[in-house]
Image (spheres, rainbow, N blue to C red):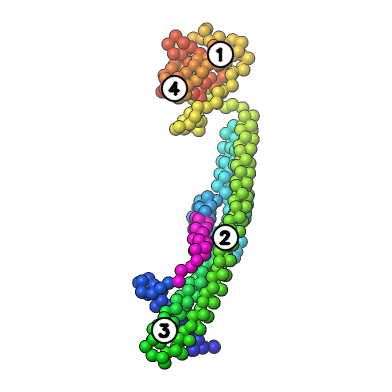
Amino acid sequence: MDFNVKKLASDAGVFFTRAVQYTEEKLGQAEKTELDAHLENLIARADCTKNWTEKIFRQTEVLLQPNPSARIEEFFYEKLDRKIPSRTTNAELLGQYMQDAAKEFGPGTPYGSTLITVGDFQKRLGGAEREFLHTSAINFLAPLRNFLEGDWKTISKERRLLENRRLDLDVCKARLKKAKSAEAKAALWSEEVDKAEHELRVAQTEFDRQAEVTRLLLEGISSTHVNHLRCLHEFVEAQAAYYIQCHKHMQDLQKELSRFPNAFAVNASTSGVSTGPSPLSTATLPGASSPSRPPNPSNALESSTLKIEEVKPPATGTRKAKVLYDYDAADTSELSLLSDELITVYTVPGMDPDWLIGERGNQKGKVPVTYLELLS
């Protein structure tokens, strides 16, 4: 083992003199060489870039992987330089649960067949999410991580070296000042002055060289911004493509569901009155906007035989309903509604299950179920 005592002692001496200089500067007992304004601005800009890049990086990680345990696991895999195992997305897991439930309920039943279809589309959504996460990790997270773990570490190392060179320079300045002060008292100190001046010139040269190296690295922050801007555009494009794909899947799912027979119509005809909107309808969501106007009934039996003025309320089966949203009648067969008013509703044989007959005083007409909250 090569153990150089002289070098160790020299390094310890340099460290000690730097510590003394730094302490005296903090106490205001020693002069400090200030960096030029341009370099100070570059340092401030670099610090700002590092701080915000770190915050954006961390929050993007949270957005892409909300589970902190999963993030910690991925962190260790990266540090161990091992491939991160594929993880099932929540949508894919939900889709699998729906399809497994359909097997238990019976795939031939309306509920079972619907679960199979919805589960399939949930898996598609999960696949789209997986692709988005993969693309974002490569095109956005990786460049930010490379800057924080690569470029920034190099900049920090050179800045620490520049600070050491500055301390050495100020130590030499203080030493020369003391030598000149002693020279004024005794001519024998002229040799010490020459030595101090030489050390100062060397320290100044090393400081200037290190300042130039640090300046060049800090000016590279502009290139970093350009690179991160490009990555940001790619992230937004990936996010937009993901949401467009999700929207398309949901539109296709709605089309698929519209092909299934309306099981709610059976429930309505057997109970004598519609049960109102399902728990997932917009009518039950706080602050939700009014639902879209349901299509006007096209049932041939209803259009040919149902005349509003001739409809009589049944002896039993009428209910009170609270109006959730304003509704303007499309024709004379419908009844206009005002939000929060109470009306009497009932159904008649052959009527479209999305509509009820509503009465308010002497006024009568068809009203859409989704605009009502049926009361007991």
Q: Sequence-wise, which precedes: disc 2 or disc 4?
A: 2
**Mark 4 is on which residue type?**
Ser
The answer to whether residue 77 of the structure is visible from this angle is no
Tag in front: 3 or 2 = 3
Disc 1 versus disc 2: distance between alpha carbons?
67 Å
Q: Which residues are magenta?
A: 33-55
Q: Find out whether the residues at labels 4 and 3 contact each other: C-beta distance under 8 Å.
A: no
Can you identify the residue that label 2 sits on? 221
Tag in front: 4 or 3 = 3
Which of the pair 34/138 is nearer the observer?
Answer: 34
**Mark 1 is on which residue type?**
Asp
Mark 1 nearby-residue class (10 Å; few <14, some 14–19, many ≥20): few
Disc 1 versus disc 3: distance between alpha carbons?
105 Å
Mark 4 nearby-residue class (10 Å; few <14, some 14–19, many ≥20): few
Which of the pair 245/258 is nearer the observer?
Answer: 245
**Mark 2 is on which residue type?**
Ile
Disc 2 versus disc 4: distance between alpha carbons?
58 Å
**Mark 3 is on which residue type?**
Lys
Can you identify the residue that label 4 sits on? 339
Q: Sequence-wise, which precedes: disc 4 or disc 1?
A: 1
Can you identify the residue that label 1 sits on? 331
Outermost residue on the top side: it is 310
Residue 115: percent from the left, percent from the top? 58, 37
Can you say whether 24 is above or below 126 in the image?
below
Q: Sequence-wise, which precedes: disc 1 or disc 2?
A: 2
Question: For the residue labelled by badge 4, is the local secondary structure a helix, a strand or a loop?
Answer: loop
In this picture, residue 172 sits left or right of residue 116: left
